[in-house]
């Protein structure tokens, strides 16, 4: 009887979990908010606890999942109908770059490092901060990017003109510190970097928040003074 009860718990527990998770709507994993993950984690915990505790009957398990599912449904309905409630439960997007300016307070608040931000950008085919006019960190942890108009189509192919492919940018200074690993990858020395930045009008590396460099476009530099916060 114990084995049969376990089978019933697994089968109907899985069905119940599928029904409840559908209440979250058609979302990809990357679109889940932290609150959505709490839903799923607790649902999984309810099923796991019932499997290993013989005192929890099959009907107790279904009752717990049903109550939790009802609570999820109520919260989702309230979040859709009420902006303030949605903001509290789901959060709201954060503006990391506004009109080309990095917001350091927003980065610190969301615990995002510069290298991590660049990696997220590159996943969307944006190779340099110089291309970004506005960047939003969505509630699910993904980013939305609006490029500068000059970086948007029409493309060179459409205009029938010849252009040189742009080399990827390399992060050489990250929050006032030289990235020696990236500098070595670029085949450059610390002296070269210091001299080049001196010519660009940046004599003090400690004042630079971010400095990117590519062999085709040269430097893109933002000092702490250029950033908000």
Image (spheres, helix red, strand yellow):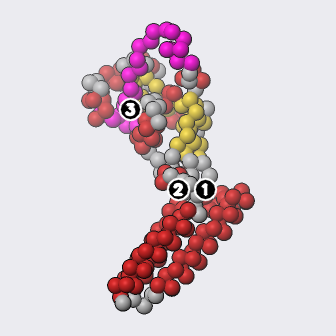
174 in magenta? yes
Quadrant of the frame with the C terminus? top right
**Residue 165 visible in the displayed image:** yes
Over which residues does the magenta segment extend? 154-180
Q: Residue at x 45, y 87 (%)?
A: 56
Mark 3 or mark 1: which is in front? 1
Q: Which of the pair 97/52 is nearer the observer?
A: 52
- Residue 228 location, quadrant: top right
Q: Earlier in the sequence, mark 3 or mark 2?
A: 2
In the structure shown, which secondary structural element does the residue marked by tag 3 occupy?
A: strand
Image position of 116 with respect to 43: above or below: above
Q: Is residue 61 left or right of residue 146?
A: left
The image position of residue 31, as x and y in percent, is 53, 52
What label sits on residue 32 in the rendered view? 2
Q: Is 64 inside the magenta-drawn segment? A: no
Determine contact: label 3, label 1, CB under 8 Å: no
Image point (67%, 61%), residue name = 79
Look at mark 1 in the image and give the residue it sits on. Answer: 91
């Amino acid at each position: 009887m114990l084995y049969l009860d376990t089978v019933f718990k697994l089968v109907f527990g899985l069905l119940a979990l599928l029904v409840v998770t559908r209440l979250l709507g058609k979302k990809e994993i990357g679109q889940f908010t932290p609150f959505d993950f709490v839903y799923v984690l607790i649902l999984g915990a309810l099923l796991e606890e019932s499997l290993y505790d013989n005192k929890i009957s099959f009907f107790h398990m279904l009752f717990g999942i049903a109550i939790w599912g009802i609570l999820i449904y109520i919260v989702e309905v309230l979040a859709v109908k009420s902006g303030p409630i949605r903001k509290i439960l789901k959060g709201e997007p954060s503006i990391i770059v506004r009109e080309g300016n990095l917001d350091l307070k927003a980065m610190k608040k969301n615990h995002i490092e510069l290298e991590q931000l660049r990696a997220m950008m590159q996943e969307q085919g944006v190779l340099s901060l110089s291309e970004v006019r506005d960047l939003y960190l969505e509630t699910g942890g993904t980013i939305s990017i609006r490029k500068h108009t000059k970086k948007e189509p029409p493309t060179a192919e459409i205009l029938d003109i010849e252009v040189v492919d742009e080399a990827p940018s390399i992060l050489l200074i990250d929050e006032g510190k030289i990235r020696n690993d990236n500098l070595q990858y670029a085949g450059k020395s610390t002296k070269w970097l210091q001299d080049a930045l001196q010519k660009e009008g940046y004599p003090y590396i400690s004042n630079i928040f971010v400095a990117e460099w590519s062999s085709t476009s040269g430097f893109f530099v933002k000092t702490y003074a250029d950033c908000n916060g």
